[in-house]
Amino acid sequence: MDQQELLENILKGSKYPGTFSLAETLTFAATRRLNAIAVAKEGDGKYYLAFLNGEPEGALYVDAEGALFGDKAVVHIRAGRQYSICEGNPEIIDAFVMGCRIFEKEHIRMNSTCFVPEIGKKSQGIGVVTLSARREKNPQNGVRVSLRKEGKIVGSDVTTGAGEVSFRVMYGDYTCLVQDRSQMLTHFQITFDESHPSHILDL
């Protein structure tokens, strides 16, 4: 089975959590430890990024001239495009990755122009921050919350029924942007560390 057939098997009937920038895609996959394929299109070019347990492990770029695999494909995977994330069977994604493995992962992170936290380094001050969006003490479901550091998005998600989102990030100071259903934007400044693992965002 070639790479295109494996892709079709992965994308067929997949869940689509959303569409994101490259930086948001990397953070979204890492936060949830996704087994997924991220897909972007531009002109006749198609860009595929494979994640296993949240890590970018494989890349494929296809256009009219043919296909590029692995590190050669990563050159074409840059910020500025929107990626649709398709969750899939980890065994099929692993088989796909075998033919297009990324060895120089730092290139992907550099291309995203965004800080992406590495999983499992608690000694360096990494953890999960939980943000609760409320209005008059009522949880706000379905509003988008973005987390920024030094002007760059490090996490973006839509709140659950409990009005919450969670992001795995470094300790430090962040700006939260909350966009409610009326498209109104509200900014919050938060500090995330061991003493402040959660914050309430009163709209």
Image (cartoon, helix red, strand yellow):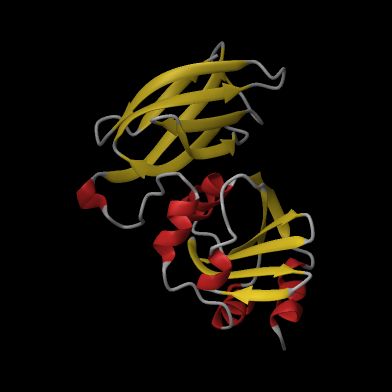
Q: Horizontal and vertical percent for residue 146?
A: 53, 32
Give the residue furthest to the left.
Answer: 123
Q: Residue at x 40, y 60 (%)?
A: 106
Give the residue furthest to the front.
Answer: 65
126 in relation to 4, above or below: above
Give the residue furthest to the top.
Answer: 136
Q: Residue at x 47, y 50 (%)?
A: 31
185 in relation to 69, above or below: above
Q: Horizontal and vertical percent for residue 157?
A: 57, 38
Q: Residue at x 49, y 17 (%)?
A: 187
Quarter holding the C terminus?
top right
Residue 163 in sight: no
Q: Horizontal and vertical percent for residue 195?
A: 24, 31
Count of marks overlaid on the render: 0
Residue 48 in sight: yes
Instruction: Please give left or right for residue 42 compared with residue 158 in the image.
Output: right
Q: Quadrant of residue 72?
A: bottom right
The front one of 44 and 200 is 44
117 in relation to 95, above or below: above
Q: Quadrant of residue 90?
A: bottom right
The front one of 150 and 138 is 150
Q: Horizontal and vertical percent for residue 182?
A: 72, 17
Quarter holding the N terminus?
bottom right
The front one of 111 and 2 is 111
Q: Quadrant of residue 96?
A: bottom right
Q: Residue at x 46, y 30 (%)?
A: 131
